Amino acid sequence: MQLSQPDRERIAEWIQTKCGQLRCTCCGYGIFEIVPLATLPIGVDLHSMRFFYAHGVPQVSVGCRNCGHLLIFSSEIMGFKPDAPPPVPIPEGAK
């Protein structure tokens, strides 16, 4: 789900309130950027090769501008719940 500018501002405010000044655990840099997409981790059934979304926690990622290391936050704990992803069509013969 694409995050709007107001969404990103709300997320930035939440991070500032809860986390203060973040520092990258890899390089020590202190400037981060909110990744403009909210994501949902997916799983895959290796037998059928079908993706599933039911067991994930929606996430917001914040990336270090120096080295690219990502910090992952639960969007539900932030009070921000992105829309569910669209269902994946089942290919013929995959049932």
Image (cartoon, grey):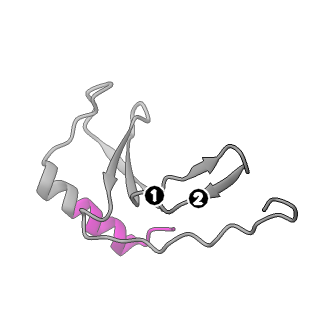
Quarter of the image for residue 74 reads: bottom left
> Looking at this view, is 56 or 1 the one in front?
56
Say above or below: 43 vs 9: above
Instruction: Classify mark 1: helix, strand or loop.
Output: loop
- Say if mark 1 contacts mark 2, CB within 8 Å: yes
The amino acid sitting under disc 1 is His
Q: Main secondary structure of the magenta part?
A: helix
* Span of residues in magenta: 1-13
Q: Which mark is residue 55?
A: 1
Where residue 29 appears, as percent x and y from the top left, is 28, 32
* Residue that extends furthest to the right in the rendered view of this protein: 93
Question: Residue 89 occupies which quadrant of the picture?
Answer: bottom right
In the image, is 91 to the left or to the right of 49? Answer: right
Question: Few, some or many C-alpha atoms within 10 Å of disc 2 (few <14, some 14-19, many ≥20)?
Answer: some
> Residue at 64% across / 48% down in the picture?
45
Residue 52 disc label: 2
